[in-house]
Image (spheres, coloured by chain):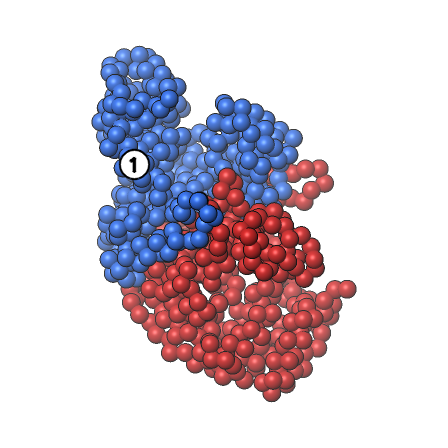
Chain colours: A red, B blue
Amino acid sequence: MPEPRYAVGDLDRLARDLLVAAGVDAEDAAITAEGLLAADLRGVTSHGLAHLPRRLERLASGRVAARPDERIGRNTPLSAIIDAGGGLGIPPSRRAMDLAIAKARATGAGLVAVRNSTHNGMASYYALRALPHDLIGLALTNATPMVVPPGGRAAVYGTNPICVAVPALEEPPLVLDMATSAAAWGKVEVAARTSAPIPTGIALDGAGRVTTDAALALTARALLPLGGAAETGAYKGFGLAVLVDVFTAVLSGGAPGQSIVEGGSSHLLGALRIDLFREPHDFRRAIDSLIRELRATPVPPGAPPVSLPGERETRLEAEHRARGVPLDAATLEELRAAAARLGVAYALEPAGV
Amino acid sequence: MPEPRYAVGDLDRLARDLLVAAGVDAEDAAITAEGLLAADLRGVTSHGLAHLPRRLERLASGRVAARPDERIGRNTPLSAIIDAGGGLGIPPSRRAMDLAIAKARATGAGLVAVRNSTHNGMASYYALRALPHDLIGLALTNATPMVVPPGGRAAVYGTNPICVAVPALEEPPLVLDMATSAAAWGKVEVAARTSAPIPTGIALDGAGRVTTDAALALTARALLPLGGAAETGAYKGFGLAVLVDVFTAVLSGGAPGQSIVEGGSSHLLGALRIDLFREPHDFRRAIDSLIRELRATPVPPGAPPVSLPGERETRLEAEHRARGVPLDAATLEELRAAAARLGVAYALEPAGV
């Protein structure tokens, strides 16, 4: 049975109302709602409204500040640091991205690091904001320890995702938005719920052995780096993740690697002006060509064409905007319970299936 | 039996003499010799002097221009494009890196793209040049088609390596220098020579199936992206490689993706000033802490500690500078034959074993 779909405007209103009821100011509530919905629109449900109830709990317990003291630190024509004051991660990240865009438009490049933040949702929400300005967008974030370095047997660093968004002309933009682990934690959670095996090479069990048993992997909380084993390039996934810690936590003076705790995550948002190198229209046309060449890669008989980074998400977003956003029953129930707890009217009605 | 070792100065002189005899001017010969030797020093033998005979052949046949018409194109305070004129790849890449460093020192960041170039050797040769200036170094290059996108069955893009170098204080620098394929082509070549199997998940056979047979992989010339299979993240290795094509070929107006041929490769060299964000000394000390935390990751009983990106190469370089550079018999014989062909005195004597 397909999940019921909801109108974007209805979901946005509910998310904003819940956040405001939890003490967040109207502007940050609106930005957070938009950032979470951006993930559901692109089919990245693990970073969408499903994540809102957890945020509301942390606001309630005070582990995330509802009215953080956000400050700008070192600030140059190319760069800045924002201290997020331990509040929600999406609002300072979006302000950082917009500041990076403004700097890039003025000087050619902008890089804004955020420290003392929390989970900032889907990285491509930020990187995509660069594209209408003929900029390339960048978003990095570190995360709490959940990945094991090659040769190690304990999770000591985060899934540390990397996102780069590149504008095309007629084709959908290139949007790579990837954890530097072999797979996302959500893959283990979903497999455990459905008692399905996980692929070999994405997680360890409690004894430090590679496992295909999702239940064991769920308990161990030890993902493998992109590349899986040492002989298939795990040092590369590990190395990329270390660089993400460098460009987020070390550059900003935040908490790197093993020492990240809830409330200590760091991000980097960036933008680069295409006309530093060539006319944006020519660049966009060349990106179209690159996409079309790669899509024409020979495939096995009957197989679909090769898919470019972000292509599927762009298609899903268009479909969800037109037909509504599907939400799973568990998320709906959690949102309903949160609304009851916070005294928010819950009037969500399916817009279709 | 250990390979004989040679003094760096002797190898440098021979390489320069061979390149000058092949028609290259003295400055470009010196830069090329240094760049190749930098790879042997760091133990990256596939990109070292073993690669010189092939370059000499291409100079002789005219496929690589000995005296290219190298020109600077668009040039801004943050960026430039160099057209390498179809010559050797190392000299314009080093000039591009040094230009990026000068721009970064002046403005905060520098990015210089190179088009119409050829194989530019080991990427970390360039990125490492940034470190003494309290800069982070970046080197990207695209390459001739040798990797198969997820879901495809033909090699349509290159191993497109990514290198980032980050300075530490007392610890060796962090130097990630990685192909975006699961393994380097050299791994298949070496396994085929020794009739050893290759790991599963790094290459396909001629029928488009994953193989562990190095001989079949050698004929097919079809590596897999970092991540291996779709379910273990191959779209990530593919996506990173596409971005490398964007930042090298598309930005510079060079040849991207499927259309790269010998003489058409493109590079990007970059530098970023650390003090845009914080005092370099504090940054370096924080990098030391990050390295030490990660090195302290629990490992299985008796196992060596977790190794950081570039740590092994830094150790090898110190050893090779002190005790000489080991060279394999096949490379020595090819260098001797090239010297005879070009009328260059070959007086290489082992400095030790």
Residue farthest along the front direction in this orientation: B301
- How busy is the neighbourhood of tag 1: few (under 14 within 10 Å), some, or many (20 plus)? some
Please name the residue shown 39% across and 61% down the image: A256
Q: Is residue B254 visible?
A: no
Please name the residue shown 53% across and 56% down the image: A222
Please name the residue shown 46% across and 69% down the image: A262
Q: Chain of mark 1?
A: B
Q: Position of residue A67 (x, y in %)?
A: 43, 81
Three-letter amino acid code at the position of disc 1: Glu
Vertical placement of B290 versus A19: above or below?
above
Q: Is residue B161 visible?
A: yes
Which type of secondary structure does the marked residue at label 1 adopt? helix
Vertical placement of B313 versus B287: above or below?
above
Please name the residue shown 50% across and 80% down the image: A61
Does B284 sit left or right of B46 as displayed?
left
Vertical placement of B114 versus B205: above or below?
below
Does B174 sit left or right of A343 as displayed?
left
Numbered-mark total: 1
The residue to which callout 1 is attached is B317
